Image: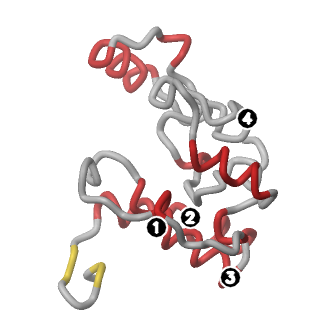
Amino acid sequence: MKDKKALTAPCGIDCFNCELYEDNLTNDFAEMIHVKYNVPKDEIACKGCRQQDGKHFHLPKGCATLDCVKAKGVELCCDCNDFPCTFLAPVADQAAKYPHNIKLINLCRIKKVGLDRWIEEEAGQIRKKYFTGKFAVGKGQAE
């Protein structure tokens, strides 16, 4: 696998844990994407946000968050004076399908513990809990 720092999107998404990332993409998942969304198979594997300049079949026009980070000259959104901003605002729409809502917790943890520690100790756990954990009112994730 390539450098996990380079595979951490500016918005805090851990590309290296994504099922579309080229090293993680299975033939079965690629086939499902191809059939369900009519995406050519050679366009499904992703190399990561930074490596593809934010363009992928699910973002054909690119990523406004990546454009903003580049314009402001920061590596991660949490390095910006405007953090957090509306590009990172959690939304309920499609939350069960996409990891959009983990961006803020990822960026806050990166800011607190550093990118290296977050990559090694937390990135995969946050994503796993997001998709498989249970919610407890007043507590967040239930144990």
* Foreground pick, 107 / 74: 74
Instruction: Determine which of the numbered discs, if any, sits on residue 113 in the image.
Output: 3
Q: How many angstroms separate mark 1 from mark 3 (CA)?
A: 14 Å
Asked whether the beta carbons under mark 2 and mark 1 sit within 8 Å of each other, the answer is: yes
Instruction: Determine which of the numbered discs, if any, sits on residue 126 in the image.
Output: 1
- Which amino acid type is marked by label 2? Ala
Could you tell which of marks 4 and 1 lies nearer the N-terminus?
A: 4
From the viewer's perspective, is 11 left or right of 69?
Answer: left
Which residue lies under the disc numbered 4? 51
Q: How many angstroms separate mark 3 from mark 2 (CA)?
A: 12 Å
Could you tell which of marks 3 and 2 lies nearer the N-terminus?
A: 3
Q: How many angstroms separate mark 3 from mark 4 (CA)?
A: 25 Å
Instruction: Determine which of the numbered discs, if any, sits on residue 123 in the image.
Output: 2
Q: How many angstroms separate mark 4 from mark 1 (CA)?
A: 23 Å
Q: Secondary structure at mark 4?
A: loop
Could you tell which of marks 1 and 3 lies nearer the N-terminus?
A: 3
* Foreground pick, 51 / 121: 51
* Foreground pick, 23 / 67: 67
* Foreground pick, 17 / 73: 73
Could you tell which of marks 3 and 4 lies nearer the N-terminus?
A: 4
- Mark 4 Cα-neighbour bin, 10 Å: few <14, some 14–19, many ≥20: few
Q: Secondary structure at mark 1?
A: helix
Give the image quarter of residue 121. bottom right
Could you tell which of marks 4 and 2 lies nearer the N-terminus?
A: 4
Name the front one of labels 4 and 1: 4
Residue 119 placement (x, y as % from top left) = 66, 65
Q: In the image, what residue occupies the spot 50% across and 21% down?
A: 44
- Which amino acid type is marked by label 3? Val
